[in-house]
Amino acid sequence: MSTEAAIVLPALGRASGVGLRNLWIAPPLLILVALFFYPFALIVMQALGGNQHVFSLANFERVLHTRQFASGIYNTIQIAVSASIGCLLLGFIFSLVIAFVPFPGARFIGRLIDTFISLPTFLVALAFTFVYGSAGLINQSLMQTLHLQFPPLDFLYTRWGVVLSEVTVYTPFIMRPLLACFSQLDIAQIEVASSLGARPWRIIRQIILPAALPSLLAGGSLCLLLTVNEFGIVLFIGAKDVITLPLLIYNKAIQEFDYTTACVIAVVNIALSLGLYVCYRAIVSFFGGRRAALG
């Protein structure tokens, strides 16, 4: 065998090996095309072309200027922002108590949070209906005790009932990363600050909060993404005049059979979700890179 052949044959073998390895991208790519890209392309085509199959932005102009769409996106953003703020506040307070206030069962509660994340969201709405609904436990007890004709508590069927349900469901998504962050915090800093006379609020503000900021931002952006797309809670509670974008898509497609309008709203909802997801990934990447640089 010549020297040239001895050099060329291994190179050809490596090239064929690389080509075979590149073929492994085909199965996941085909799955993505079948399950995501093709249905998404059909939604975009229906939104642009409608039933006439003439592509234009006329459908977007018609739908985006309606009062129903404006109300839907306003309710979606207001509920998502309110629920995310509530999750941040409650999650931070509860995580502080579990991590830094010793009490029996703290570790069990931390493990219970992981289990709570796996539960379907409509279970919380169902539980709230049994407790706070018009025929729920509290209203029936108050009506019988105070001899009232109508239920005194009716907040559940408003947007604030939806916010309370979402806060209950998504607060563990804030607590999980916070508890992991607090477990890595140097307790010696807190002990030294406390021995020097620093009050608890100052310790939280100057030591704990800066360390928890990346987890708060990442968890808050994730909660915002999840609450923007929340459908089960809003549908199950049936709050009056509270129509979010996912519920509006459901109403247009399933109840009114207006698929073009539903697809237009779906494209807007997807764009909003992707924008929030990009923000979430940017926050995670920024703080992750910063930690790696500091380490």
Image: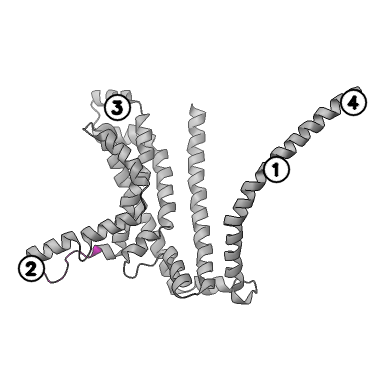
Q: Earlier in the sequence, mark 1 or mark 4?
A: 4
Q: Which mark is residue 4?
A: 4
User: Mark 2 is on which residue type?
Assistant: His
**Residue wearing tag 1:** 23
- C-alpha gap between disc 2 and disc 3: 53 Å
Q: Determine the image quadrant of residue 140.
A: bottom left
Q: Are marks 2 and 3 in contact (CB under 8 Å)?
A: no
> Is 163 a magenta residue?
no
Q: What secondary structure is marked by label 3?
A: helix
Q: Earlier in the sequence, mark 2 or mark 3?
A: 2
In this rendering, position of residue 83 left or right of residue 47: left
Query: Where residue 86 sits in the image (x, y, percent)?
Result: 32, 51
Q: What residue do we see at 51% from left, 39% from top?
A: 285
**Residue wearing tag 3:** 190
In this rendering, position of residue 288 left or right of residue 74: right
> Is 150 a magenta residue?
yes
Q: Earlier in the sequence, mark 2 or mark 4?
A: 4
Closest to the camera, between mark 2 and mark 4, is: 4
**Residue wearing tag 2:** 147
User: Mark 3 is on which residue type?
Assistant: Ile
Closest to the camera, between mark 2 and mark 3, is: 2
Q: What residue do we see at 35% from left, 49% from top?
A: 119
Front-most of residues 150 and 115: 115
Closest to the camera, between mark 3 and mark 1, is: 1
Residue count near mark 1 (Cα–Cα under 10 Å), binned few <14, some 14–19, many ≥20: few
- C-alpha gap between disc 3 and disc 4: 69 Å
Q: Is residue 174 visible?
A: yes
> Magenta residues, as a range?
147-155
